[in-house]
Image (spheres, rainbow, N blue to C red):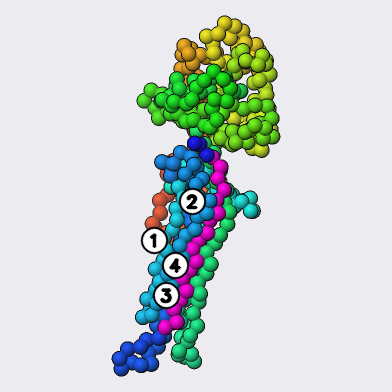
């Protein structure tokens, strides 16, 4: 079962109370205060784990509570801190506060984590309240309450490229041919009800991750069907591979279907129509598919590829095209990041000690004597 949206109640553990205790030993009947501090309550943490593939593991339990810290004891013995509760989710999970609606953190990379229910601090024992005027304090702190809230976890599949198109356009078959993924395939619409991921290898290069996204329908941007659930997974993709079925079973026009999908991408809450796109007419083995390709290309004013996942026609072309587009995008992102990196100047202390490196400067022609430089 694939689950990409879960609501959970989380609560950090309460801090243990401090102790009100006094030293009592043989020959020391009136010893001073020796109450220890209470332990800190455990926190609830959400962490991205590469071994998790969806949120199904969190559906069986709605309430997650960390344990309370132990109470302080005499002889200045502090209570034990409670262990944290760690919820493992797939990379690409967005963590929101359900009540406020704000994003707590976007867990993109493996190891990213966020504390969603902070444990309470343990209370101080009476040792901390001793003073010159109060040598036998009985005050102590009860410990802070742990933080609690409802959170919303939303998984957005992380993939370099995503397959979009109407149901039964051949997306799952395409994925199975260019990668080792084994999605469910059948000759009827809505076979794919959740995203499938596959790694496409290209020669000796690193390849890229391709997502087979469930088929969209008109009105998806407004939530018709499972529109919002499907479109959410398109957000993180860098390139779209748009498959157009040449002869839909419902008799609809392929050109209209292409523009219908583009309309849904444009009207989604986060516009998605600006992503680079490779347009393909699928099922080239069918007679007349090339004429549909020519008609769509004339309407769009740019190249449309003709492919067949059955015979393999055009698949290498699509993979090569996407690989080049991804390389260009990553290069542009690296250049943009380099431009935004602030210039680091040596500190005053580093200048005094000479502990800094200077940037190499090209040779400068000295000015001629008597000439203003």
In the rendered image, is residue 262 in sight? no
Where's residue 189, x and y in %? 58, 22
- Magenta stretch encompasses residue 231: no
The Cα–Cα distance between marks 2 and 1, rounded to whole angstroms, is: 45 Å
- Magenta stretch encompasses residue 20: yes
Residue 126 sits above or below residue 301 on the image: below
The Cα–Cα distance between marks 3 and 4, rounded to whole angstroms, is: 9 Å
According to the picture, the residue beneath numbered tag 3 turns out to be 72
SS for tag 2? Answer: strand
Of badges 1 and 4, the one in the foreground is 4
Where's residue 182, x and y in %? 44, 25
**Residue furthest left as drawn:** 26
According to the picture, the residue beneath numbered tag 4 turns out to be 69
The Cα–Cα distance between marks 3 and 1, rounded to whole angstroms, is: 49 Å
Quadrant of the snapshot with the C terminus: top right
Of badges 3 and 1, the one in the foreground is 3
According to the picture, the residue beneath numbered tag 2 turns out to be 46
**Residue at image x 45%, y 82%?**
20
The Cα–Cα distance between marks 3 and 2, rounded to whole angstroms, is: 29 Å
In the rendered image, is residue 272 in sight? yes
Q: Is residue 353 left or right of residue 89?
A: left
């Amino acid at each position: 079962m694939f689950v990409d949206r879960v609501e959970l109640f989380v609560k950090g553990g309460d801090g243990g109370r401090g102790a009100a205790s006094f030293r009592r030993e043989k020959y020391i009947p009136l010893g001073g205060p020796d109450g220890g501090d209470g332990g800190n309550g455990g926190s609830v943490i959400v962490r991205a784990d590469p071994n998790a593939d969806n949120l199904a593991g969190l559906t069986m339990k709605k309430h997650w509570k960390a344990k309370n810290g132990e109470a302080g004891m005499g002889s200045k013995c502090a209570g034990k801190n409670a262990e944290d509760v760690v919820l493992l989710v797939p990379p690409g999970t967005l963590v929101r506060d359900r009540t406020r609606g704000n994003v707590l953190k976007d867990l993109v990379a493996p190891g990213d984590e966020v504390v969603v229910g902070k444990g309470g601090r343990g209370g101080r024992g009476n040792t901390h309240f001793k003073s010159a005027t109060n040598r036998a304090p009985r005050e102590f702190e009860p410990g802070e309450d742990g933080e609690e809230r409802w959170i919303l976890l939303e998984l957005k599949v992380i993939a370099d490229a995503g397959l979009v198109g109407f149901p039964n356009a051949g997306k799952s078959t395409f994925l199975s041919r260019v990668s080792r993924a084994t999605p469910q395939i059948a000759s009827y619409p809505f076979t794919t009800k959740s995203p499938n991921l596959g790694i496409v290898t290209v020669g000796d290069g690193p390849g890229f991750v391709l997502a087979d996204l469930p088929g969209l329908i008109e009105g998806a941007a407004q939530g018709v069907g499972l529109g919002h659930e499907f479109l959410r997974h398109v957000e993180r993709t860098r390139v779209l591979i748009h498959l157009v079925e040449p002869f839909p079973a419902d008799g609809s026009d392929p050109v209209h279907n292409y523009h219908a999908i583009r309309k849904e991408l444009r009207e989604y809450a986060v516009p998605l129509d600006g992503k680079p796109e490779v347009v393909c007419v699928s099922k080239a083995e069918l007679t007349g598919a090339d004429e549909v390709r020519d008609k769509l290309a004339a309407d769009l004013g740019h190249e449309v590829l003709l492919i067949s996942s059955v015979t393999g026609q055009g698949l290498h072309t699509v993979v090569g095209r996407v690989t080049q587009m991804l390389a260009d995008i990553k290069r542009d992102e690296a250049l943009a990041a380099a431009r935004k990196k602030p210039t680091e100047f040596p500190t005053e202390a580093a200048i005094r000690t000479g502990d800094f490196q200077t940037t190499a400067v090209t040779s400068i022609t000295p000015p001629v004597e008597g000439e203003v430089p």
